[in-house]
Amino acid sequence: MIDLLIYLADRSPAFRRFVWKHWYQYLAGYDVRDWHFMNYGFLDSSPDTFVPQLEESDEPNRYCIQLYDRVARAVDLQGKRIVEVGSGRGGGSSYVHRYHRPAATTGIDFSARAVRFCRGAHRHAGLDFIRGDAERLPLDDASCDAVLNVESSHCYGSMPRFVAQAFRVLRPGGHLLFADFRIPSVAAELPATFERAGFRIVERQSITEQVLAALRADSERKLRLLERHVPPRRLATLRRFAAIEGSDVFRHFENGTFVYERFSLEKPAS
């Protein structure tokens, strides 16, 4: 079922928006206090890779956190005003706010359930969560220094509309920090989409292998979490969604059906 939805969603923007909106609303209904991340993670074993030092309470989510860290570390966020579009269960916004020390962080998600969960689960000075649409961001023009978008944009009805919105709300010299997966033909269109909106591509990195490594390393923990909280009748579907090792979605990354890319993009200063 997940494979069919992804196939159809790639071919119809309206259907894609409808499907993912309802799917994530369903997931947001799980009031599980220790479930803060839904991304696939990042693990790079090369010797020169930066490895964040985490508090003990953050260690269980290390691989998911490392994806956020890799995306956020592209620019210095200290003292800045940042926005995460598609903040989900809030773990990414919370991590970036606590470790990268921006002055203010706003997580935006279309799910009112998710926003309520995040406001209860992540209470830190300067961190807030609001409801909003990625294609119609509820922010003023030139009102933030960085927009984070991690493993969320594949849900949107229009990628160009989201990118145009990100460009609008960024101050000159601000950055869109982006990571997500696509089928290869759609991934190939991303640079042109960013550039048409006015962005300059500062950095582009294929991270499919690092995402696969994280999925392998984290599958057992994720499976235990699912088995504790998900009804048995839903378990097979959630295993695929979480890309547990051996699942169809996991194999799609292995065989190249899906590729995962990271971009750092700048809104020109003038």
Image (cartoon, rainbow, N blue to C red):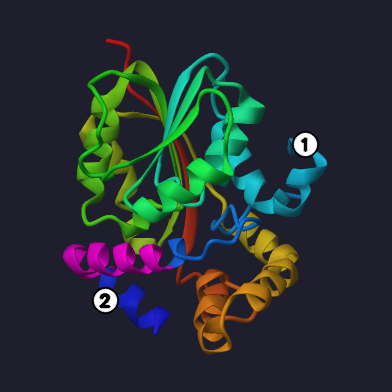
- Residue 48's tag is 1
**Position of residue 42 in the picture relative to residue 186 (left or right):** right
The residue that appears at 75% across and 64% down in the rendered structure is: 217
Q: Is residue 111 on the magenta stretch? A: no
The residue that appears at 55% across and 56% down in the rendered structure is: 39
Taking 104 as reference, is 4 above or below it? below
Observer-nearest of 62 and 30? 30
Residue 46 visible in the displayed image: no
Whole-percent x, y for residue 189 in the image? 29, 51
Residue 267, picture quadrant? top left
Mark 2 or mark 1: name the one nearer the start of the chain.
Answer: 2
Observer-nearest of 250 and 145? 145
- Residue 14's tag is none
The residue that appears at 62% across and 56% down in the rendered structure is: 33
Taking 244 as reference, is 53 above or below it? above
Query: The magenta stretch spans which residues?
Result: 10-26
Q: Circle 2 sits on which residue?
A: 8
Amino acid residing under circle 2: Leu
Dominant SS in magenta: helix
Residue 12 visible in the displayed image: yes
Observer-nearest of 252 and 132? 132
Q: Is residue 16 on the magenta stretch? A: yes
Distance from Cα at disc 2 to Cα at disc 1:
40 Å
